[in-house]
Image (tube, helix red, strand yellow):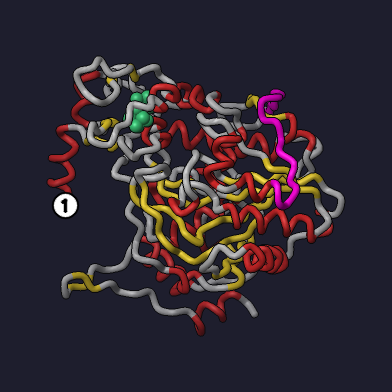
Amino acid sequence: MPLVFSLCFGVRQPRCRPQNGFCKGLSDGERYLENILFVGLSESKAMTKVALLGCREYDASLIRDKILEGLSLIEADTGVFSGARVLVKPNLLSASLPEKAIVTHPEFFRAAIQAVKVLGGYPVLIESPAFQSLEKVMKKTRYKAVVEEEGCEIADTKDTEVLFHEAASRYRRFDLPKALFAADIVLNLPKFKTHGLTYITGAVKNLFGLIHGLKKSQWHVKARDKEAFSNLLLDLYEVITKGLQPPKRFLHVMDAVVAMEGDGPGSSGSPKEVGAMLVGEDAIALDSIMVTITGLDRDKALTLAPGEERGLGIASLERIDVRGLRLGDFFVDTFKPSLSNPVSRIDRWPMNTRFLRDLLIERPLPLEEKCTLCYQCKAICPAGAIERSDGRGNKPLYDYDGCVRCLCCMEICPEGAITVKKGRLQGLLDRWAT
Ligand code: SF4
Ligand code: SF4
């Protein structure tokens, strides 16, 4: 049945959310969906397929079957799995309990491993946490048990090779694990979360985890602000999806059973149940669907429209053929974005002057009452802007002149002890704007 019929006759109307007795109006995502309902769609315009599936519990056999169902819905050629070496790439940001929703849930990962085996493939876990050892992260997140029970190989991400792709926009050369070059298929398993720097982290951002350990931090110095970093993510996506020879197949399966809102993507964010999982071959399309479902602001996710403009995927909803459930089935209360909304281009005049930075750009602020002086923030800081406490306070010392506002420290802090403090004028401007 053409998609236009399923939307016109079956979709639930976008909900109006009463708040304190008044209608709060529609979220950006709802307005966007409402617009395309009126415009109408036709299958001939759709250019990428995404399977949208309901899933409310982390039950591996249920999720495995849904992954297989999703692949069938998008008409993926599953024959390519037979005998293939399949890199399975979850989000293992840090050593944390799965219930905190910082990592792709271990049962979601188990389901992916099982699905690969059902299709005749050979699964290999690939991931390089930003700071801690993979061994430590796997223990805390319960991946170690899954890897042992399922008998899954683990790729070595330290052994790297340079991949160059001339057509990428700015960054064309990336040091990537040799395991990526030797694979046939990459099965990307992102966790959908809000993000202090890039606004969201989903399918596109998850592939940044292929870069080994602290080498990731160095990219934050090269691409300092939100806009530059989002472009870097698109460059990396382009280089690995188009530059590898022979080309690899990329499949993305999003864990949005429980996602994250607020000051993500680490301990400061809050788990939020969505009950969804997505399957597709276009990372930008998956992220676009999730931004819509969660009512976040599409314009602030700088990998969506720019990614489509660069021909790397489809972000426009009217060009995504959503199969399985309908978008309207998944409107949750609008996600709270991260408090941080970094100003773009902080490394250019006049935003690179200390005076304007302090007035207009938020900065990371460690909280004495939560800090345990573990100094993981100091270890990850790409700008060397964090020093040990001088003994006068129970928190590390920050050099805000050197800080590039990447928020890696906030992302990695295991205690959720770093918040963002708005610039003095920012608070005033925000009050004036509302
Ligand atoms: S702010 Fe967080 S990461 Fe930094 S020392 Fe304190 S607890 Fe550790
Ligand atoms: S202090 Fe935090 S936000 Fe600033 S550069 Fe270091 S890691 Fe990034």
Q: In percent of the image, x 16 and y 52: which residue is there?
A: 434
Residue 365 shows up from this direction: yes
Span shown in magenta: 148-165
Q: Amino acid at mark 1?
A: Thr
Kindly identify which residue carries mark 1. 434
Q: In percent of the image, x 46 and y 54: which residue is there?
A: 99
Whether residue 231 is situated above or below residue 282 in the rendered picture = above
Q: Is residue 344 left or right of residue 90?
A: left
Q: Is residue 61 left or right of residue 91?
A: right
Could you tell me which quadrant the N terminus lies in?
bottom right
Whether residue 13 is situated above or below residue 405 in the rendered picture = below
Q: How many marks are shown on the rendered structure?
A: 1
Q: Which residue is at the front of the view, 315 or 132?
A: 132
Graded by Cα atoms within 10 Å as few (under 14), some (14 to 19) or many (20 or more), the crowding at tag 1 reads: few
Q: Ligand 1 is located in which of the four quadrants?
A: top left
The question of residue 149 being in magenta is answered with: yes
Residue 166 image point, x, y percent: 67, 27
Q: In percent of the image, x 51 and y 62: which residue is there?
A: 257
Name of the residue lying farthest toward the bottom: 9
Q: Which residue is at the front of the view, 180 or 272?
A: 272
Name of the residue lying farthest toward the right: 83
Residue 346 shows up from this direction: no
Query: Of helix, strand and loop, which one carries label 1?
Result: loop
